[in-house]
Image: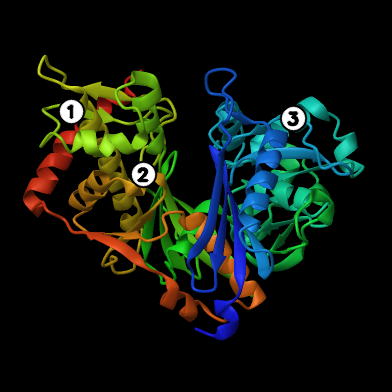
């Protein structure tokens, strides 16, 4: 390692669906400080999911301030990773949002998306585009304020960059732009037809920039050092960088609120017929790489429900030990579809089901069945990605996210896939990837080859189930999916 890198630091901000994290990373790739604040979204009515931007921003300042206190100087850059499809509309002068941010999980514009599709305009309900339109229709129906430049709009990353820079940075990277619903994957810029359909002026949107590169500096009036803002990227794409999934065909799973599977597609997009979707992976030095992404909409949220909804566990960590206390699920099965089924079904109306209960069923059986259900859902998503992929299958999958600390879940995942599963030493791969990009932009690391020297694996989970047994179990579980999709 170069001496300069060894004595340098980067800080990453990861603004997720349920909280905000700051990760301070040294030139050896090791975390030196990690600070987290839970910031849960509000659900004011069924299907509605919103964030209070000011609460989110206060938490952002808190975690950055506390993390930076661990190193008095020498922080070279800030990388920002965020949840991607969340829509924000804000005042240009103050930076304050004019309406609660509407989460990517929010379903209020599902019907609008269906109407647009009938008109030949495709926008996913998980994207920010129709959510931005929904807010503007209520705060600026004639679009006078936004045309006059008094309002700005975009995804969460763009708003955070604007607020942290004191309004000097108006930027979103290509990965976040591709998740907004306003992006043209072929033209690789804003889609004029969609902007016209939603009446969103292009001038109100941020500039699309590289995922790494100095954009400006943190505004010193916020009480933070004037650190260069050196990377902006979507959280799942950041996790791909944090897991060093740099070659076409490589795959990772991030276990967050949802389980997100991403496959590196190389320099051209892959188009799916299996409910997966092409996105920009990152843009570096003007060169775009793509990924194919699929979603198991409920993953970590199912474990949270076991705690908060059923009360059968006290902490998420307990799910692994309790489930491991029984050798199998005792005939219990679970379809974790609390907010619909994602890839390959794309069925927003599906709901979670737990079945196979008997008088012999214990809470351990229910918890194990839910973990198995998460693993099988990820298998379905992985199969959908592979169906459209011309590349050789990966020799192993890398995993990250909060639930990746669950040994039993990862063993079940290896068994479900028939592939080794690698757990990294740093589970917060989204934050780590944003830090890597900030370090590449500011000279902490010269190339991604240097990052290969600092990435560390903590444990490898090998499949323990034979192919025939695995497929028999999978087929049995899939027969129950229909119960989650009944009206």
Report helix, strand or loop for mark 1: helix
Question: In the rendered image, is residue 482 in sight?
Answer: yes
User: Are the two marked residues, 1 and 2, in contact with CB atoms closer than 8 angstroms?
Assistant: no
Classify mark 3: helix, strand or loop: loop
* Residue 121 drawn at (x, y percent): 61, 41
Q: In the image, 39: left or right of 292?
A: right
Q: Nearer the viewer, residue 192 or 92?
A: 92
Task: Give the position of the C terminus as an image quadrant.
Answer: top left
Image spot of residue 220 (x, y percent) = 82, 56
Cα–Cα span, label 1 and label 3: 43 Å
Q: Residue at x 36, y 42 (%)?
A: 344
**Alpha-carbon distance for marks 1 and 2?**
18 Å
Task: Point out residue 62 in the picture as x, y percentages from the top left corner.
Answer: 67, 45
Q: Residue at x 54, y 69 (%)?
A: 26
Q: Is 312 on the left-hand or right-hand side of 102?
A: left
Q: Give the label on residue 73, or none.
A: none
Label 3: which residue?
A: 99
Asked which secondary structure carries label 2, the reply is: helix
Alpha carbons under labels 2 and 3: distance apart: 32 Å
Give neighbour class at mark 3: few <14, some 14-19, many 20+ (Cα, 10 Å).
Answer: some
The residue tagged 2 is 403
Mark closest to the chain's N terminus, 1 or 3: 3
Report the side of 467 relative to 335 (left or right): left
The earlier-in-sequence mark between 1 and 2 is: 1
Q: Residue furthest right?
A: 148
Which of discs 1 and 3 lies nearer the camera? The answer is 1
Q: Return the residue at label 1.
A: 365
Residue 145 quadrant: top right
> Residue at 44% of width from left, 52% of height from top?
293
Q: Earlier in the sequence, mark 2 or mark 3?
A: 3
As drawn, the residue found furthest toward the top would be 359
């Amino acid at each position: 390692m170069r001496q300069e890198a060894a004595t340098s630091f980067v800080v990453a901000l990861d603004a997720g669906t349920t909280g905000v994290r700051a990760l301070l990373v040294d030139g050896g790739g090791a975390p030196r400080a990690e600070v987290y604040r839970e910031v849960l979204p509000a659900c004011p009515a069924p299907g509605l999911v919103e964030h209070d931007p000011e609460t989110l921003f206060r938490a952002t300042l808190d975690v950055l301030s506390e993390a930076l206190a661990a190193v008095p100087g020498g922080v070279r850059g800030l990388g920002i990773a965020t949840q991607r499809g969340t829509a924000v509309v804000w005042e240009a002068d103050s930076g304050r949002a004019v309406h609660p941010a509407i989460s990517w999980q929010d379903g209020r514009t599902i019907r609008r998306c269906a109407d647009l599709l009938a008109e030949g305009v495709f926008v996913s309900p998980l994207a920010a585009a129709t959510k931005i339109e929904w807010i503007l229709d209520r705060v600026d129906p004639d679009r006078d304020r936004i045309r006059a430049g008094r309002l700005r709009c975009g995804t969460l990353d763009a708003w955070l960059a604007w607020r942290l820079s004191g309004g000097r940075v108006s930027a979103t990277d290509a990965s976040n732009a591709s998740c907004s619903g306003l992006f043209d994957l072929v033209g690789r810029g804003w889609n004029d037809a969609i902007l016209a359909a939603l009446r969103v002026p292009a001038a109100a949107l941020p500039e699309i920039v590289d995922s790494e590169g100095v954009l400006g500096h943190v505004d010193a009036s916020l009480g933070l050092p004037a650190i260069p803002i050196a990377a902006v990227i979507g959280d799942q794409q950041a996790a791909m960088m944090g897991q060093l999934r740099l070659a076409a065909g490589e795959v990772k799973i991030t276990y967050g609120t949802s389980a997100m599977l991403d496959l590196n597609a190389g320099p051209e997009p892959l188009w799916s017929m299996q409910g997966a979707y092409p996105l920009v992976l990152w843009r570096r030095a003007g060169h775009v790489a793509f990924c194919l992404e699929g979603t198991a909409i409920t993953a970590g949220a199912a474990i949270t429900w076991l705690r908060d909804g059923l009360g059968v566990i006290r902490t998420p960590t307990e799910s692994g030990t309790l489930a491991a206390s029984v050798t199998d699920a005792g005939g219990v099965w679970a379809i974790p579809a609390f907010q619909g089924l994602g890839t390959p079904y794309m069925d927003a109306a599906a709901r979670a089901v737990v079945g196979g209960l008997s008088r012999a069923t214990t809470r351990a059986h229910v918890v194990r069945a839910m973990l198995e259900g998460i693993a099988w859902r990820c298998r379905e998503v992985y199969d959908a990605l592979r169906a459209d992929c011309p590349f050789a299958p990966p020799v192993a999958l890398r995993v990250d996210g909060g639930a990746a600390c669950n040994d039993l879940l990862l063993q079940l995942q290896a068994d479900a896939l028939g592939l080794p599963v690698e757990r990294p030493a740093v589970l917060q791969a989204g934050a780590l990837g944003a830090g890597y990009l900030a370090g590449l932009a500011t000279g902490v690391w010269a190339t991604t080859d240097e990052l290969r020297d600092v990435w560390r694996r903590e444990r490898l989970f090998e499949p323990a189930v034979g192919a025939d047994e695995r497929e028999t179990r999978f087929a049995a579980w899939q027969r129950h999916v229909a119960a989650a999709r009944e009206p």
